Amino acid sequence: MAPVKVTKICCIGAGYVGGPTCAVIALKCPHITVTIVDLNQARVDAWNSPDFALPIYEPGLVDVVKQARGRNLFFSTDVDKGIQEADLIFVSVNTPTKKTGVGAGFAADLNYVELATRRIAAVATSSKIVVEKSTVPCRTAESMRTILEANSKPGTRFDILSNPEFLAEGTAITDLFSPDRVLIGSLQTPEGKSACQSLGDVYANWVPKDRILTVGLWSSELSKLAANAMLAQRISSINALSAICEATGANIDEVAHAIGFDSRIGPKFLRASVGFGGSCFQKDILNLVYLSESLHLPQVAAYWRQVVEMNEYQKSRFSKTVVDTLFNTITGKHIAVLGFAFKADTGDTRESASISLIRDFLSERAYVTIYDPQVEEAQIWLDLSEACPNTPLENIKKQVTIAHSALEACKQKEAVVIATEWKEFREINWQTVYDDMSKPAFVFDGRLLVDADKLRKIGFKVTTIGRGERV
């Protein structure tokens, strides 16, 4: 069966995955018309803004959109038109962890995936290749296929593919330009393999063919969860070791450097921190836990659950260290938290360690001033409201202030907590910070970011995660 030559692509969902991914496809494939559709008018307006004030901060993204928008890259709220005209449709909608019902707290909420699938079936009048781009549980494609086949019009055929994203926020554009691999899963039928080749031919416009991996549909879905679980496991492992370092006087940087030289281990994802965050790691591991329990594999479920529990322990351990160091109480004390995004070079705050730390500080009745160079104030208030559901926002605002610079945030504070590894925090004039702080002045480095010895010479009391004080 000859593969379909793709000339028009529609992406349902203009978020962190669909927007950057399809913008790069448009840039690299000028002969393909790419339309990204979303029901959120404000988000689409931001993608179309004349001054390129995009709804997502990602280094290099503005340059990509500037080159392709209006040429062969379009953003629209007309979902039906996008579906009707496309040869290939990416489903790139949000799949958050369920908050209620069966599997609450673990299983993925597939409501948006189902709604998008039903819309495709209702609107499409010609055959389509439908691609799972969202992170989904195993065998979601089977559900999508059942819905499409039950609701399709006569003579309309749907082929389902899985094409998970492996982007790291902050380096997504670089990752898209030169991916480690592009994974495409399909049913191992002639029709499935043909659809797989159609999508592979799109990526082959810039990705070397030996990096385009084709596998079975279920293997592709599981590979995404497995990759994130393995990466998160490494972070939780090094964070567990950081606790031992602090108790023994060892240095986690030195330990990580030493074990990273082992070619079987390698150096990546061995940097201790206050904990991992983001939209994927925790969600995907909990998804894996739920899958394991559903398959009656309790030991497997317990193993992966421990990765998340270790991450939560690391965050609570760090906030306890702050309290203990500040003479066992932070009630009424003023603390600056530098960084609110879950990592540098993104404005994404999902599962950010900062949220957990600030919630803990507020429960201790401390006053907190927050500074982050990319996160919008409205997002900070929303996240803190969700983190403290029993506290009215007006009460939260009595304890929390948002600053517009790191120096402003640190002024007249008892302690500074570094929660995100923004480069600018390394380059702060720490002498100025010290001069304007209450004494003794404390710095808590949750990201191994600053030169502790240099800060101590200025006069700071410095606590660095993963570094013990014993000799």
Image (cartoon, grey):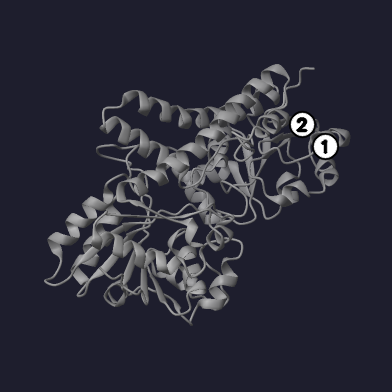
**Frontmost residue, 179 versus 393:** 179
Query: How far apart in space, not on screen, are marks 1 and 2 (Cα)?
Result: 7 Å
**Residue 321 in view in this figure:** yes
Q: Going by the picture, which residue comes out furthest to the bottom? A: 71
Q: Within 10 Å of the Cα at label 1, are there few (<14), some (14-19), or many (20+) other Cα atoms?
A: some
Q: Secondary structure at mark 1?
A: helix
Q: Residue at x 36, y 33 (%)?
A: 289
Q: Is residue 409 above or below residue 173?
A: above
Q: Residue at x 40, y 45 (%)?
A: 223
- Residue 196 on image: x %, y %: 34, 61
Q: Is residue 226 above or below residue 304?
A: below
Q: Residue at x 13, y 70 (%)?
A: 153
The amino acid type of the residue labelled 2 equals: Val
Disc 2: which residue? 462
Q: Within 10 Å of the Cα at label 2, are there few (<14), some (14-19), or many (20+) other Cα atoms?
A: many
Q: Quadrant of residue 326?
A: top right
The amino acid type of the residue labelled 1 equals: Leu
Left/right of residue 197 with respect to residue 335 in the rendered view: left
**Frontmost residue, 402 versus 170:** 170
Q: Residue at x 32, y 35 (%)?
A: 290
**Frontmost residue, 19 versus 365:** 19
Q: Secondary structure at mark 2?
A: strand
- Residue 143 on image: x %, y %: 22, 51
CB under 8 Å between discs 1 and 2: yes
Q: Is residue 225 above or below residue 111?
A: above
Quadrant of image for the N terminus: bottom left
Left/right of residue 433 with respect to residue 100 in the rendered view: right
Quadrant of image for the C terminus: top right
Which labelled disc corresponds to residue 455?
A: 1
- Residue 384 on image: x %, y %: 50, 44
